[in-house]
Structure formats: structure tokens, C-alpha cells
């Protein structure tokens, strides 16, 4: 990495942190409880002025909290480069199969590429938190890389996610997730194998934002017409996505390698079932308007491979309770506070059995919300 590129990435990172108050969300490494600082206060006061939620957090010794918040370039590199290697590895095998093997071999590797690529949003999420690498510009650079590969407008996602953490499931201040969420088996089958409409939707939304068209209550909250400057970053990134992928398509078609844009544009189309089963566990069926992450977030265990692909987000109570803890420390954090957590489902099957029973109850009573049993103080 040249000095110029490094300085450019660092400048972008610093500007984003200062402009959007992102440092407040990450917090100081020695502080487990996030405190409001002026940039983010100004960013949110139009929605929730002079009101703050006093979130419950499990008490931990200060030295333990400090060690949990410690970021590491080595550990961050293992997570980031490992995930990227798996993704590009399957992409390379798909490219090789396209040029040298039977079509069905290519199809298998394309499916595997999509299966891994679907988790790119989790990479963007963690890198956007700024906790993966100790070196700030590395978080910024890889956040851009995964956002580009996954057709993700990380600018809009991070603006929304700041509020989601501060006001988790407290509408209208958090509209990133709104309960109740209705899920049926058809949804898994629809997105699990092939879902071309996913890319069509992403393309339409990217084009809309690239044209500077914002709509809906949540987008108007994040990017009000009274603050046109706030819209520049998401519009600029949307245009980068369109121009960058257009160049890939033109170059690939000119060289006869149409498998390349098929991969870069199709990471949302193929094999998203595993991602769906993991990511949709986070809040579905739980309680809103509560001040305890144990009641509005869900933690469950996973095998190490899927947990790695999911960037450890199965530990979702822990992530919300201590948002500045790097993802590679969440397993340790879980072990330290599990005595204070609700019963933890073991694996995808068990967690979806729990969710299924909740959803069935909500069909009978639309006002029903599951309140997880908490340990006795």
C-alpha cells in the first residue's frame, strides 16, 4: 500500500468519523457504556431531543472490559483476509470452471460464492463499526471493498445503524428493524437457492440514490431535505457502484469472461439461504420499547465455520450490550456474561424452533411479543 493511498484512506476515515459522530458509537476502548458526544447528538436530536435510553448492561471488572475492547490488526486480519480468501477462492474456482470444466462444476462454485458473498453485509457492518482493525484506515478500506462486492451502500447502512444501536427497537427513532416481522417457510425457499429479484431490487435502489432521490420516513429522518449536504456521501457511493460495476461488465464482455460480472452482480442472487437463517434471528419475535438488550436481541450458538462467515453476529445480545467490542472477542464476552443471559439456543435448528413457536403465537395474537426469561438478580 503506497503512502498516498494510505493517507487518502486515513483522511476519508477521519472525515467520516468527525462528520457523522461515528467515534461515539465505537466509544473509547476503556469505556463499555457509550456516551453521547456533540456530533451524534446533533445528528439525532431532531428525532429524540433530550431523551436517552438507560440500557441495562452486565457489570464486568474494568480490566476485563478494557481487554475485551482491545483491537488487533492481527486478529482483524485473520477475520477479514480469511473471509475474503474464501469468497475470492470460490470466485476463482468458478472462473476456472467456466473456462476449463463442465457447466455444472461452474454452477456449484457460483452457488458457493453466493453463499459466502451473502455475508458481505456483516463484513461491512463490523468494519463500519471500526472495531475490526486497530489501524483505522484498514477498517475504511476493507469496508469499501466488501460494500463494492456486495452492492451495499455502506454510507446509508452506517447512518441507519448508528440509530439502531442507540434506539434499538424504539420506533420511530429506530426504523432499521420494525416489529413484528412476518416470516414463513416460503421466504427461505425464495432466497435460499436463486433469487434474481434481489439484484434487480439492489440495482433499482442504487440508481435511485445515485439520482439523489430519497424517500420514506426513515430515509427522510436520516437525510432530511433541510440538510442536503448529508446526502452527498450516499449519492457519491451509489454512483461509484454503478460506474465501477459498469466498467467490470464492459471489460468482461469484451474479453469473453462474462462469468466475472455474473459473480460480482450475482452475489445476492445465489445461495443466500444460510445467511437468511442466521441474520433473521437477531430481533424477530422479541420485545420492542424495552431498555434491556436481553429482551430485544437474540443470542444463539453456531459452529465455528458458520460463526466465522457470520462475523460472530450470532452473539447479538453481546454485540448490542457492548458495541465497541471487536467481533473476534464476542465469544469470550459471551462466556463471561452468559450467567446473566436468557437461555441460549444451540444451533440454527433450535433457534428457529423457538422463533417458529413465537411466530405461530403472533399469527393468533398480533400484539404478542416474546419476553425471554431472565436470570434472577
Image: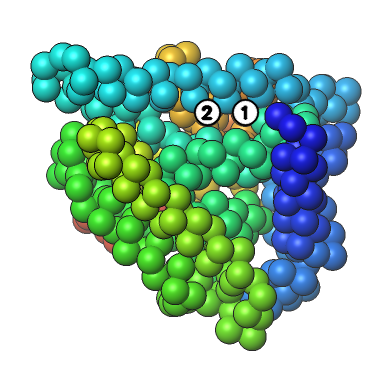
- Using the image as rendered, state which of residue 98 and residue 163 is in the foreground: 98
Percent coordinates x, y for residue 278 in the rendering: 38, 33
Total label count? 2
Horizontal side of residue 61 vs 336, given as left or right? right
Question: What is the quadrant of residue 230 in the picture?
Answer: bottom right
**Considering depth in this image, is 229 or 125 the residue closer to the camera?**
229
Is label 1 in a helix, a strand or a loop? helix
Residue 80: image location, x then y, percent:
57, 25
- Disc 1 to disc 2, C-alpha distance: 6 Å
Q: Which residue is depicted at the point 54% across and 52% down?
A: 154
Question: Does residue 325 lie above or below 363 as drawn?
Answer: above
User: Tag 2's secondary structure?
Assistant: loop
Query: Which residue shows up at 27% across the image and 42% down it?
Result: 254
Q: Is residue 211 visible?
A: yes
Q: Which residue is disc 2 drawn over?
A: 311
- Using the image as rendered, state which of residue 194 and residue 316 is in the foreground: 194
Q: Quadrant of residue 321?
A: top right
Q: Is there CB contact under 8 Å for labels 1 and 2?
A: yes
- Dividing the picture into quadrants, the one containing residue 216 is bottom left
Extreme residue in the front direction? 254
* Residue 120 in the figure: left or right of residue 18: left
Q: Is residue 330 visible?
A: no
Q: Give above or below for 179 relative to 208.
A: above
> Badge 2 local density, few (<14 within 10 Å), some, or many (20+)?
many
Q: Residue at x 76, y 62 (%)?
A: 19
Q: Which is nearer the eye, 175 or 2?
A: 2
- Quarter of the image with the C terminus in it: top right
Q: Earlier in the sequence, mark 1 or mark 2?
A: 2
Residue 1 place in picture, x, y as percent: 71, 29
Residue 231, compared with residue 32, is above or below; it is below
Q: Which mark is residue 345?
A: none
| Residue denoted by label 1 | 327
Amino acid at each position: 500500500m503506497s503512502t498516498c493511498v494510505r493517507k487518502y484512506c486515513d483522511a476519508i476515515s477521519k472525515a467520516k468519523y468527525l462528520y457523522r459522530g461515528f467515534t461515539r458509537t465505537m466509544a473509547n476502548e476503556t469505556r463499555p457504556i457509550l456516551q453521547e458526544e456533540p456530533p451524534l447528538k446533533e445528528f439525532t436530536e431532531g428525532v429524540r431531543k433530550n431523551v436517552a435510553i438507560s440500557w441495562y448492561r452486565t457489570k464486568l471488572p474494568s480490566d476485563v472490559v478494557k481487554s475485551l475492547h482491545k483491537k488487533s490488526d492481527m486478529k482483524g486480519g485473520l477475520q477479514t483476509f480469511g473471509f475474503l480468501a474464501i469468497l475470492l477462492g470460490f470466485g476463482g474456482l468458478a472462473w476456472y470452471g467456466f473456462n476449463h470444466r463442465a457447466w455444472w462444476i461452474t454452477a456449484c462454485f457460483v452457488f458457493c460464492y453466493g453463499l459466502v458473498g451473502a455475508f458481505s453485509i456483516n463484513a461491512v457492518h463490523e468494519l463500519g463499526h471500526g472495531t475490526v482493525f486497530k489501524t483505522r484506515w484498514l477498517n475504511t478500506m476493507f469496508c469499501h471493498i466488501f460494500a463494492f462486492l456486495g452492492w451495499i451502500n455502506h454510507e446509508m447502512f452506517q447512518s441507519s445503524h448508528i440509530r439502531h444501536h442507540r434506539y434499538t427497537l424504539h420506533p420511530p427513532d429506530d426504523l432499521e428493524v420494525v416489529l413484528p416481522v412476518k416470516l414463513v417457510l416460503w421466504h427461505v425457499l425464495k432466497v435460499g437457492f436463486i433469487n434474481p429479484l434481489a439484484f434487480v431490487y439492489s440495482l433499482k435502489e442504487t440508481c435511485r440514490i445515485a439520482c439523489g432521490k430519497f424517500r420514506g420516513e426513515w430515509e427522510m429522518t436520516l437525510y432530511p431535505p433541510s440538510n442536503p449536504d448529508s446526502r452527498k456521501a450516499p449519492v457519491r457511493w451509489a454512483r461509484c457502484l454503478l460506474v465501477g460495476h459498469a466498467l467490470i461488465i464492459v471489460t468482461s464482455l469484451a474479453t469473453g469472461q462474462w462469468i466475472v460480472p455474473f459473480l460480482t452482480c450475482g452475489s445476492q442472487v445465489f445461495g443466500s439461504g444460510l445467511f437468511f437463517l442466521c441474520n433473521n434471528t437477531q430481533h424477530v419475535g422479541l420485545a420492542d420499547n424495552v431498555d434491556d438488550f436481553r429482551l430485544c436481541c437474540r443470542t444463539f450458538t453456531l459452529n465455528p465455520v458458520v460463526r466465522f462467515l457470520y462475523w460472530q453476529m450470532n452473539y447479538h445480545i453481546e454485540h448490542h450490550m457492548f458495541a465497541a467490542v471487536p467481533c473476534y472477542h464476542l465469544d469470550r464476552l459471551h462466556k463471561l456474561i452468559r450467567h446473566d443471559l436468557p437461555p441460549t439456543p444451540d444451533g440454527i435448528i433450535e433457534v428457529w424452533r423457538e422463533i417458529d413457536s413465537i411466530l405461530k403465537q403472533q399469527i393468533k395474537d398480533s400484539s404478542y411479543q416474546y419476553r425471554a426469561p431472565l436470570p434472577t438478580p
